Image (cartoon, helix red, strand yellow):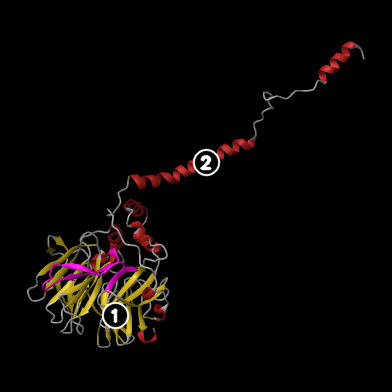
Amino acid sequence: MNESEGLRFRRLNRPQIITDETHEPQYKTTSSYSGKVFRVTLLTLVAFLLFPLLVVVFLLESPIQPEVFSLGEPPLMTGCYEPNLKLRQAERLFEDGLIGPESLANIGDVLYTGTADGKIVKIEGRSIHVLATLGKPPCGSREHEHTCGRPLGIRVGPNGTLFVADAYLGLFEVNPVTGEVKSLVSTGKMIGGRRLGFVNDLDVTQDGKKLYFIDSSSRWQRRDFMHLIMEATADGRVLEYDIETKEVTVMMENLRFPNGIQLFPDEESVLVAETTMARIRRVHVSGLNKGGMDTFIDNLPGFPDNIRRSSSGGYWVAMSAVRPNPGFSMLDFLSQRPWLKKLIFKLFSQDTLLKFVPRYSLVVELQDGGTCVRSFHDPHGMVAAYISEAHEYNGYLYLGSFRSPYLCKLDLSKV
């Protein structure tokens, strides 16, 4: 090898020194291109899905204007409120034959109730007979409920007739034999500057001269009851109807979803279930304290509906939703967050929201002073669901429901 060839060999085989500035050859691969396409597609899809949501959140107006209110920490489910399965011992009656038998009354062994399709029915033994219809067909849907009518509270007067509160149509007197219907108070009537918007429960004095009834809201109708609960509208009233003079008087107002009503034994006051506030108020309707109001029991473990007398001299209170402690109560949580309530009602319908409320049926017996005596439970509403009233007769507790397609009967001797 001569000198020139040796120099050429050394140049070709010179070791390469790698530094930070040394660049590897760059190659454009198909994988990096596919990744960019995936990211662009994903971002487009997310924007496509989020855009309608943003429109709903920022542009659509919420149907409710909720108020901030405070509920105390729910009572512990211990002692008298200790969970049990006693309501599961109830027997279902007329399954799929009665839709929403909200309230119950009896004359002897014959039961009477109002149903979701606007009927007043008579139950004799194992037979159901339609006694009267308050509204006009068609019935059975939310859209037609205001014309069909929705009978809620029902009572027997001292003269043996039935008094019925219809959510949309007003107060009626019904002959339990002939089915003849007489209108007492129409919802078209202006009372205290407002129309009756949601007539609910009622009670009648022993002499049959006065009816006390609930107007749950002037703003919301019965078919929008979830709006009323979530908005916490304080426009509910207790009213008095004088059967002789036919005059209607406002006895108390500014209540948050007053629901059930029950006369005190002395008939100088009525107990009123204030559902949204999970409490029962005592409204004085006559006597020295007339016009006053105090609290019979506060901070119940659930949201009370109808109130009825028990054979022991106390009161049965029905609840279809509870405030579990320990546990989580959605309504308690939302009470301090009106902005979240607004958002929820922009996104979901009332029927959808009901599915998020855990079913838990609870009946509590209270004595004078609001002391709890005993309670019957059905966690998850396996047998008795959506209960609205507990009506005691002849050793049995009959459980009404604002939604379920049946009536329940509980033997009190076995619980």
Which residues are the magenta region? 277-306
Where is 55 relative to 386, above or below?
above
Q: Which mark is residue 383?
A: none
Where is 158 relative to 239, above or below?
below
Q: Position of residue 319 (x, y in %)?
A: 33, 71
Q: What's the distance in space between the residues labelled 2 and 1, CA to CA?
A: 61 Å
Give the SS element for disc 1: strand
Q: Is residue 278 magenta?
A: yes
Give the SS element for disc 2: helix
Q: Residue furthest right?
A: 1
Residue at image coords 24%, 60%: 220
- The amino acid pointed to by label 1 is His
Mark 2 vs mark 1: in front: 1
Q: Is residue 317 visible?
A: yes
Picture quadrant where residue 20 is located:
top right
Write down the residue under mark 1.
Answer: 391
Q: Is residue 121 visible?
A: no
Write down the residue under mark 2.
Answer: 41
Residue at image coords 54%, 40%: 39
Q: Position of residue 344 (x, y in %)?
A: 36, 54
- Badge 2: how crowded within 10 Å, few (<14), some, or many (20+)? few
Mark 2 vs 1: CB contact within 8 A: no
Q: Is residue 106 magenta?
A: no
Where is 18 relative to 211, above or below?
above
Picture quadrant where residue 143 is located:
bottom left
- Badge 1: how crowded within 10 Å, few (<14), some, or many (20+)? many
Residue nearest the observer in this picture, 263 or 73: 73
N-terminal of the pair, mark 2 or mark 1, is 2
